[in-house]
Image (spheres, rainbow, N blue to C red):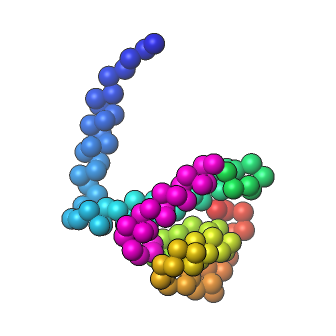
Amino acid sequence: MVTLDRAAELQEAIDSAEEEGFTSLEQAAADELMRLWGDLHHQMRDARDGCWSVGCESVAHRIAVMTKALDEATPWQQIELELLESGVYQRFHDLMGVPYEPPDMAVVAEMRAERGPNIP
């Protein structure tokens, strides 16, 4: 087994964290929650035949935990188009009973038209 000293890579990650500029745990948690939505999008996209995978379940669980802890929804403007178009974002918050600003589907459609149908 090869053991590598990852000090340089670890230090780079530590240094880049300093650049985030979060002033509170709540800000950092909200950012992480937004990133988890991106992770869910990737898990759903990569799932075989579009099925709900174990990976989807795991990320959705983490989203639920963070949403409950923050007691607020990630703004829809920070969510991938596919999760808005499919209703996953909306249904998730409906099921959790967490208030959220419903996406402006006209804006979502406009964003989709700008990106094109085959670009996630």
- Picture coordinates of residue 19 (x, y %)? 26, 55
- Outermost residue, left direction? 23
Looking at the image, residue 50 sits to the left or right of residue 13; the answer is: right
Q: Nearer the viewer, residue 52 or 108?
A: 52
Q: Can residue 5 be found in the magenta stretch?
A: no
66 is higher (above) or lower (below) than 96: above
Residue appearing at x 37%, y 67% in the figure: 69
- Picture coordinates of residue 108 (x, y %)? 61, 79
Looking at the image, residue 61 sits to the left or right of residue 56; the answer is: left
Q: Can residue 61 be found in the magenta stretch?
A: yes
Q: Which residues are magenta?
A: 54-74
* Residue 73 showing in the rendered view: yes
98 is higher (above) or lower (below) than 31: below
Total numbered circles = 0
Looking at the image, residue 106 sits to the left or right of residue 7; the answer is: right
Residue appearing at x 61%, y 75% in the figure: 91
Residue appearing at x 56%, y 82% in the figure: 103
Give residue 72's quadrant in the image.
bottom left
- Picture coordinates of residue 39 (x, y %)? 53, 55
- Picture coordinates of residue 3 (x, y %)? 38, 17
Q: Nearer the viewer, residue 48 or 67?
A: 67
